[in-house]
Image (cartoon, grey):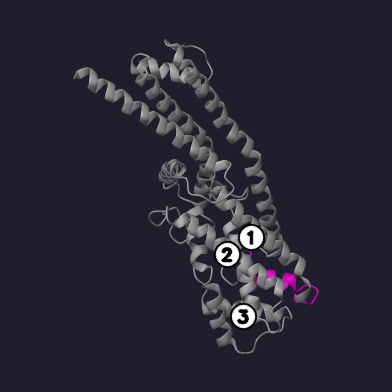
Amino acid sequence: MQHFLLLALRVLTGMGGVILVITTLSAAIRSFVLPRNEVVRLNVWVFVGIRAIFDLVAKLAHSYERRDKIIAHYAPVALVALPVVWEALVSLGYTSLYWALGEGSWVQCYVLSNSSLLTLGSATPHHGFTTPLTYSEATLGLLLLTLLLSYLPTIYQAFSRREVTVALLELRAGTPPTAACLLNWLNHNSSLQDNELQWAEWERWFVEIEESHTSLPILSFFRSPQPGRSWVTSSGLILDTAVLLFAAVEGPRPRQIELTFKAGCLALNRVYRFFDDKAGSEPSSILPGEDAKEPQRADFELAWQELAAGGIPMNQDRDAAWQHYQQLRARYAPALEFLAHLTMAPRLKTAV
């Protein structure tokens, strides 16, 4: 009876090891090879656990600049930790397999597993039929590291392309950047209709944000080189500029600007929905007084005056324009606010 129970335990342990190895390998493939935005729960647990540690440390800081420096390390550390966790789970899975096949005690099986996984060759199996397992484990260990290393250039290329647009926006929208200032810059030749190429570039930027930040979600947490910049803030700035133009400026709505606005709303809302179901509770990484705020009527009036002073023809019905502005902004404001909290973005600017 005791022999039967031990045999049953070895079978169950071996099956558990196989499931653990397959689950880990599936997570790695879905993370970097599968070309679609699929939630990988194993990665989520790793990222959430590391983020909790960084949030705890960041709470000790007394300024946004210090917190920004701390949180800036979160995404790189989480990305490097991912293959470490994968390999640890693969090692545990193969340890279970070796024990189930009678390769000795748990300690001996653990030593054999890590020797094979890291290709050290410091331990050899006692039974010839387990040798193929050691080879397969060594292959998986190299594969997991290769997956991450091969995709690091892809991640940083997407990050670099994103940040070029963020930096260019800062040059055009003033300091601090505002939608009114950006609209005046777009009107430098006294015609808001002659900027289709600029809006088309922003449309492509939004499309790439949607694709890259859902298929490689860790990209959302890579912070800009300068603490005052953020891809979330820049997204809001472009969309606020489009909404201000639609609501307050007299004249036709150029088709390219409508396409850019639609692309921006889709991008922010799809990234928002990707993270929303696993964010848990409201993130607490924003200092009091630094969270996003909704634009007020006074802000809208100041933006109106700034645009009128720049020679832009304005809609005469300000009440209707204000209502239209609020209706359009409601299409992306919840996503913008959520992502600002999630990524600890600098304070979002309103219409001015």
How many numbered marks are there?
A: 3
Instruction: Say whether residue 73 is left or right of residue 152.
Output: left
Residue corresponding to mark 1 = 206
Tags 1 and 2 in contact by the CB under 8 Å rule? yes
Residue corresponding to mark 3 = 247
Q: Earlier in the sequence, mark 3 or mark 2?
A: 3
Q: In the structure shown, which secondary structural element does the residue marked by tag 2 occupy?
A: helix
The answer to which of 193 and 350 lies nearer the viewer is 193
Give the distance between the C-alpha atoms of the residues marked 3 and 1, in whole angstroms. 22 Å
Three-letter amino acid code of the residue under disc 1: Phe
Q: Earlier in the sequence, mark 3 or mark 1?
A: 1
Instruction: Say whether residue 168 is left or right of residue 176.
Output: right
Three-letter amino acid code of the residue under disc 3: Ala
Give the distance between the C-alpha atoms of the residues marked 1 and 2, in whole angstroms. 8 Å
Q: Residues within 10 Å of mark 3 (few under 14, many from 20)?
A: many
| Range shown magenta | 177-192
Q: Which mark is residue 218?
A: none
Q: Earlier in the sequence, mark 1 or mark 2?
A: 1
Tags 3 and 1 in contact by the CB under 8 Å rule? no
Q: In the structure shown, which secondary structural element does the residue marked by tag 3 occupy?
A: helix
Instruction: Say whether residue 67 is left or right of residue 8.
Output: right
Examine the rendering and report whether any part of residue 230 can be seen.
Answer: no
Residue corresponding to mark 2 = 266
